[in-house]
Amino acid sequence: MSLPEMSALFPTLQEVIFVLFALLIAVTSLIAAMAPNLFHNALGLVATLFGIAGIYFMLEAEFVGVSQILVYIGAIATLITFAIMLTRGMMFGRTSAMNRQGLAGAIISGLFFVVLLGIVFQVPWPNVVADITDGEALIANLGALFVSTYLLPFELLALLLLVALTGALLLARDR
Amino acid sequence: MAIDYLPLLILVITAMIFAAIAIITPTIFGPKRDNTQKKQPYESGMIPFHDARRRFSVKYFLVAMLFLLFDIEVIFLYPWAVVLRDLRWLAMAPMVFFLAVLIVGLLYEWKKGALDWGE
Amino acid sequence: MDWLNLLIIPLARSVALILVLLTAFAYLTWFERKLLGRFHVRYGPNRAGPKGLLQPVADAVKAIFKEEFIPDHVDKPIYVLGPALALIPALVIWAVIPIAKNVPAIADVNIGFLWILAVAGVESYGLILAGWSSNNNYSLLGALRSSAQMISYELPMGMFLVSILMLAGSFSLVELLNSGRAWWEWLWLWAMFPLFFICILAETNRSPFDLPETENELVAGYQTEYGGIKFSLFMMAEYINMITTSAIMATLFFGGWRLPFGLLQNVQILGPFVLAFKVILLLFLFVWVRASVGRPRYDQLMGFTWKILLPISIGYMMITSILVVLFK
């Protein structure tokens, strides 16, 4: 298969896959927000995060995609399900997705949506993006940046995690 | 290139279809004999007297939280691991500090008894 | 032509891979029961077919023709989703494992390592879903235990993988096998193999770490409310996970499709057989451990990974990094 042939075919296929992921994200994020059961909300969130990881892979940001799966799905979502299991009456009970702040929330998210739309139409998106041929070199480059340009944020991150660690201990301490 | 990942997606979808087929097939072939006893929760022969809605030890939550924090640290080690042989001591020094902080955290948890599972 | 290369061939390879894994699963159950029989000085399955070889077929037929029912008290969609989600990760990890020189099972991507990590990270969800949706004390406790166990053992495993990554210097498993290792690297890795194997045992919920399904306290753990094919899918997930992790260990520690000393390394057809042979040896190890080692208490299990394995793995990682800086 020659390269022009492939590029003639691929955009359509890529679009199809993108639409599939986008639909997955849209539907599951609605479940995450609207389902009456808290556990279903959490699972909807997990599926949404999967869809976003898929988008990252399509954007050739493999490391971000994998970090998304490992940290968000593997750790944070597990933490959320554990938290639900620890909460009395939350596991099988039904809760309403609406409360007194429903209206305010709708207005704020509507405004945010308008802002996003504005950004989408304002930004001059490039038409042709250079193909990244070696995803691995990209990750290696990231590793090199951690220990050179972004050294200070990197070390601060370690301290931040240490603070979070002590905070976690304080939260879960036996009283 | 992104197209390289298409086979992975195809494999995931094939596996999903396979699982769906495996679950649906027996509903066609199997017998159907309904009775209420069969549909009760299993409690080793006792009559179930409450839902499984009890609360669980906060230890599980603590473990998940510790895992989250250490997992983030490990994630940062992967890109670093592949450049180590090129950058050598230059890459080594920052990571020693990073890991030292991690180890201090682990020792603190240990000292505070967060790693003891027994009550 | 385009469609053929892009869709049909990966699809055909995926279907072939799943069929091979299913057959391997079926005969792994026979292999395990036969071996356990030998360890216990009894025969093991010997009625269906010569030496019980048709036993897996009989089991499959039975699973398909059993009654499928969903108990009243469960959360139905999630109850059905649980077994499916347990099985899928075990199957898809295979995509990046090389089965012959420059031939990964499905896809030639240069981030094989990351793919394995990502899929391994979601493996606990099938169990969590099953345990929660079953609405049964045993199931829920089993699911909580297993997910806490799996995430705890994932940390030392990740640290060991970082060490392997440092020695390899590449995320690609194909590259890992193409570039040789120095003798001290082999020895250093093999010294770590027993610890890595312990992590794998805990990750796959195999005995002695099968605490999620300790029959004397939790009946069958997260699968208590499951029967028929859905129960079989959990079994399938566990056994295919054994095969998959054996293949990963064979690739990382024992050269995968390669014969020792680079013998016959250009004979492509030999690759899958060499890999299969190594996988069978590792599977024997799984069964041997099951037959020999008793189950620890849950607090011992958790204490072991946080207080012993994790510090050792961090230390191992740091020593490896110094070795890499000095000698690579």
Image (cartoon, coloured by chain):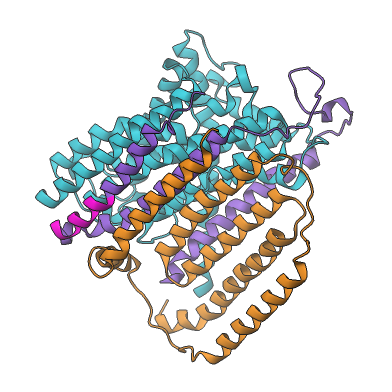
Chain colours: A orange, B purple, C cyan
Residue at 71%, 46% in the rendered image: C78
Residue C273 visible (yes or no): no
Quadrant of residue C140 within the rendered picture:
top right
Determine whether, in the image, residue A92 is placed left or right of residue C268: right
Q: Is residue B96 magenta?
A: yes
Determine whether, in the image, residue A122 is placed left or right of residue B19: left
Q: Nearer the viewer, residue A165 or C96?
A: A165
Identity of the residue furthest to the front in this view: A175
Q: Is residue A5 magenta?
A: no
Q: Position of residue B95 (x, y in %)?
A: 24, 54
Q: Position of residue C286 (x, y in %)?
A: 42, 27
Labels in figure, total: 0
Which region of the structure is painted magenta?
B89-98
Q: Is residue A31 above or below residue B24?
A: below
Residue at 42%, 32% in the rendered image: B115
Q: Is residue C297 above or below residue A1?
A: above
Determine whether, in the image, residue B28 is placed left or right of residue B18: right
Quadrant of residue A36 within the rendered picture:
bottom right
Identity of the residue furthest to the left in this view: C326
Determine whether, in the image, residue A119 is placed left or right of residue C292: right
Q: Position of residue B114 (x, y in %)?
A: 44, 34
Q: Is residue C143 above or below residue A40?
A: above
Residue at 61%, 36% in the rendered image: C234
Q: Position of residue C261 (x, y in %)?
A: 17, 41
Residue C53 visible (yes or no): yes
Q: Main secondary structure of the magenta part?
A: helix
Residue at 37%, 59% in the rendered image: C111
